[in-house]
Image (cartoon, grey):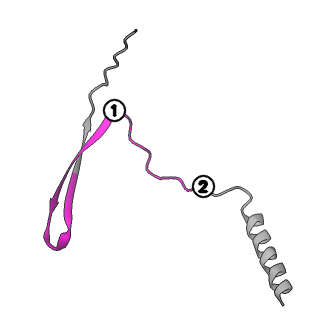
Amino acid sequence: MRRLMLIAALALAGAATACAPNSIVARDPVPAPSPELGYVCDSRPTALNAFVTGCEPVSREQRAVVRARG
């Protein structure tokens, strides 16, 4: 009986891989924001331990790169 169950389990595993030859990769449907875009968020508590959050997109300042030798 144990051998029969093992053969059945291997057959089911083989059938599952035959249906999906390429690996299934989960992808985020929303693309990542650009590095120049940032968000300013504000959260306020409400009744029953809940929060109301509002976020606004803002453009970020350019980063300054300081290079020194020595």
Q: CA distance from mark 2 to mark 1?
A: 28 Å
x and y percentages locating residue 59 in the rendered image: 27, 34
Establish if 38 lies above or below 18. Answer: above
Residue type beneath disc 1: Glu
Labelled disc at residue 25: 2
Q: Residue at x 19, y 61 (%)?
A: 52
Q: Is residue 44 above or below residue 63?
A: below
Name the residue at the front extreme. Answer: 70
Residue at the limit of the structure toward the bottom, as seen here? 1
Q: Where 46 falls versus 8 (above or below)?
A: above
Residue 69 is situated, as x and y percent measured from the top left of the image, at 40, 9
Quadrant including the C terminus:
top left
Residue 48 vs residue 14: left or right? left
Where in the figure is residue 38, as x and y percent of width and height?
29, 39
Q: Quadrant of the N terminus?
A: bottom right
Instruction: Determine if the magenta segment contains residue 5.
Output: no
User: Front-most of 9 and 66?
Assistant: 66
Front-most of residues 9 and 24: 9
- Residue identifier under label 1: 36
The amino acid sitting under disc 2 is: Val
Task: Tell me, yes or no, whether the highlighted magenta stretch contains residue 50.
Answer: yes
Residue 62 lies in quadrant? top left
User: Is 2 or 52 nearer to us in this picture?
Assistant: 2
Q: Specify start and end residues of the magenta stretch as a single range.
A: 26-54
Dot label at residue 13: none
Q: Residue at x 32, y 37 (%)?
A: 37
First in sequence, mark 2 or 1: give its number.
2
